[in-house]
Image (cartoon, helix red, strand yellow):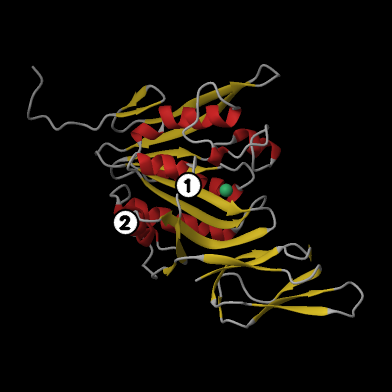
Amino acid sequence: MPDQKAPSCKLVQILGETVHPGEHVTLDLQVARLYTRTTVEIPVVIRRAERDGPVLLLLAGVHGDEINGIDSVRRILQEVQERPLAAGTVVAIPVLNVFGFLAMQRQLPDGRDLNRFFPGSPRGSLASRLAHALVTEVLPAVDVVIDMHSGAARRHNHPHLRYTEGDENSLALAEVFDPPLIMKAPIRHKSLREHLVSLGRTYLLFEGGKAGSLDEDAIREAHRGITRVMHHLGLWDGTPDTERGAVRVAASKWVRAPHAGLFHPLVENGSHVQEGMVLGSVTDPYGELTHQVRAAFGGYVLCVNTSPVVNQGDALFHVAF
Ligand SMILES: [Zn+2]
C-alpha cells in the first residue's frame, strides 16, 4: 500500500521519458531522416527542480531565421545551469525548426510555415509531422508556453508581447512579463496559439528585433520578461527587474509607401506618434522628388521597415493604438 500521507509529485513526462525531481536531461525530438540518411534530432533541454511547480516551455526558432529568441533561451539555460531552479521545470527548445536554422530561412525545406500546421499529423508534410511531434511528445507536459519571434528580414519589431484575445490568464501573464508594449492577438487557424488555447494552456508570443540578426535590445527585453515570469511562477528565487508598466494596445495598422524610391525613416521604433506627423520620406534617386510619409492615425510604432529602397505600397511603419 502506498503511503497516503506522502506528498504526490507531479508527473513530468516528455518524449516518453519521466523526468524526476532534480533531474537535468537533454532529450531529442526525432522528426525526419534527410536524403543524406542523416536523422534530424531536435534537442529538448529539461531542467527540473527538487520542488514541485509549474512546467514552463521556452520555445524559439519556430521560424528558423529568427535568432534573437534562440539567444534569449540560451541565456536563460546558461543561468539555470549556474543557479538551479527554485521549483518547477523549465523545458527549453532553443531551435525548433532546425531545418530553417541551418538554411537561415523562416520556413521548412518544403516552403511551409510551421506555425500554420498545428496540431499536425504523423503522416502529413514535414511541417505537419514536426508540429505533431511537438504536440504529442512535449506539449502535454507543459503549463505555460513563451514562444520567441522576430520580424521578417527587413522588418524590425520593437519588443512586444502578443497575448490571446479573450484569455485573461495570458493577459495577466503578459503584464507580469512587462514588455514595452502588449497587444492582443486573434486566434489564427492551425497556429500553435490555437492548439494551446484548445488545451487551456497559457501562451505568450514575444516579438523583438528582426530575422537574420542578433539584436541586444530585443534579447535583453525577452530575458527580462522571462525571468519576471519565472519569478512569478515560483521557478526562480532571484530578484526580478522592477515593473515599468507595459502599454496596452488593441489594434494595429501599416503605414504604406506613397511612392517607390529610397526610404528614409525619421521616427524611432517604439516611439509614440501623432496623427499627421511626418514618419519618414521616400525620395527618387535624382534629387528632384521627396515624398513625406505621414501618420494617418496616432499610436506607437511597433515595426519599422529597414529596406533602403521600397516600392509603392510597401509596408513601412506598423503603428499600434
Ligand atoms: Zn516568427
Residue 75 in the image: above or below residue 309: above
Q: Mark 2 = which residue? A: 168
Residue 143 lies in what quarter of the image? top left
Q: Secondary structure at mark 1?
A: strand
Q: Is residue 62 left or right of residue 290?
A: left
Residue 56: in sight, yes or no? no
Disc number placed over residue 191 in the picture, else none: none
Q: Is mark 2 within 8 Å of ligand 1?
A: no
Label located before the other in sequence (1 or 2)? 1
Pick whichever, 289 or 42, lies toward us: 289
Q: Is mark 1 within 8 Å of ligand 1?
A: no
- 10 Å crowding of disc 1: few (<14), some (14-19), many (20+): many
Residue 159 in the image: above or below residue 236: below
Say which residue appears at 43% left-offset and 32% top-offset: 135
Residue 237 in percent (x, y) is at 30, 52
Tags 1 and 2 touching, CB below 8 Å: no
Residue 52 in percent (x, y) is at 24, 38
Q: Nearer the viewer, mark 1 or mark 2?
A: 2
Q: Which residue is at the far right?
A: 286
Pick whichever, 134 or 51, lies toward us: 134
Residue 199 lies in what quarter of the image? top left
Pick whichever, 209 or 21, lies toward us: 209
Residue 298: in sight, yes or no? yes
- 10 Å crowding of disc 2: few (<14), some (14-19), many (20+): few
Say which residue appears at 60% left-offset and 47% top-offset: 67
Say which residue appears at 49% left-offset and 43% top-offset: 189
Q: Mark 1 = which residue? A: 147
